[in-house]
Image: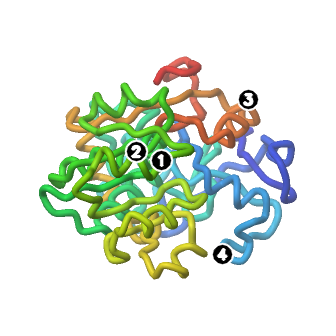
Amino acid sequence: MPKAVQLSAYGGVEQLRIVDVPKPEPKPGEVVVRVVAAGTNPGEIGIREGHLHAMFPMEFPFGQGTDFAGRVDTIGAGVDGLSPGDTVIGWSNRRSAQATYVAVDRSQLIRKPPALDWFRAGSLFVAATTAVAAVRAVALKPGDVVAVSGAAGGVGSLAVQLARRAGARVIGIAGDTNADFLRSVGVEPVAYGDGLADRLRATAPQGIDAFIDLFGGGYLDLAAALGVAPEQTNTIIDFAGAQKYHVKTDGSSAGASAENLAFVADLIAWGEIVMPLTAIYPLAALHEAYTELARRKTRGKIVLALDTTVAEPIRSPR
């Protein structure tokens, strides 16, 4: 039987179960994909724990996962441009990507670039589209100085490189263990923690023009204290702070499109930017994957391998 991750009640990782489900049949305009790899995202933890019920009302049981990559299995009526066996990257608006098979609208799929590996492809959509939206929101100009919190995470590791491509000088706020990675992509690392404001002022004595908050926890207070204009400040997580300081909140919803997904996928495939992976887990290690994700210490993405015949899951490849 095909498998799917399902949540039967709000709570911790123990509420996530791998269950047998029928293989989906495509409706008109839909494509059923056999999933090779599926991503995990911090937002799924908030949904699982019930904190985002008002924003994402769900009826139990419901699935998990937005990002995936795989092979086309079956095609519904009216679908053009794809055939069974084609390799694709996509996203599920039903949060059902962590499954053997997923059915999505044709518009939610792009062809996987041949040079892009399955695991980066399968964990790409949310991070890529959020990074594109967050960088565009702060309207960087060549020579601008931008600070990015959570700079080595799934979204951050892409956002700092997109900001560099926009011509900005990028200061990445992250832990010391990520300093070498940030330097390797042309970003100036600054460690988070006590004294951060002073370290940022010392790094950019002429001031910081823009701030992208990907972590929350008071970074908008810091941006305001540094004198960053609201129109060049964006957060994807601190919505209360955004109301307080009247800053932007562009994230995955603002960036969600096949065009943005294809843009970032091609950049990674051609080696123009890199996408680090913290770990690749088999589906059976689902609880371990989400426990690690909740620590918020990842560099890049944590990925689930649904089809282990493609490549053996490995721990911490970075």
First in residue order: circle 4 vs circle 1: 4
CA gap, disc 1 and disc 3:
40 Å
Q: Position of residue 65 (x, y in %)?
A: 61, 51
Q: How much space separates mark 2 and mark 4, taking CA atoms?
A: 36 Å
Residue underneath mark 2: 199
In this picture, is 41 found above or below 252?
above
Q: CA distance from mark 4 to mark 3?
A: 29 Å
Q: Quadrant of the N terminus?
A: top right
Whole-percent x and y of residue 242?
51, 75
Circle 2: is it few (<14), some (14-19), or many (20+) Cα within 10 Å? some
Give the residue at mark 3: 284
Asked whether residue 82 appears in the rendered view, the answer is: no
For badge 3, the amino acid type reads Ala
Q: Where does label 4 land, which residue?
A: 55
Identified at 48% across, 78% down, the residue is 245
- Identify the residue under disc 1: 196
Real-space CA distance between mark 4 and mark 1, rounded to the nearest whole angstrom: 32 Å
Q: CA distance from mark 1 to mark 2?
A: 5 Å
Q: What secondary structure is found at the residue carrying circle 1?
A: helix
Nearer the observer: mark 4 or 1; the answer is 1
Whether residue 93 is visible here, answered yes or no, is yes
- Amino acid type indicated by mark 2: Arg
Three-letter amino acid code at the position of disc 4: Met
Depth order, front residue of 132/210: 210
Q: What amino acid does circle 1 point to?
A: Leu
Relative horizontal placement of residue 157, taking residue 38 as reference (left or right): left
Q: What secondary structure is marked by label 4?
A: loop
Inter-mark Cα distance, 2 to 3:
43 Å
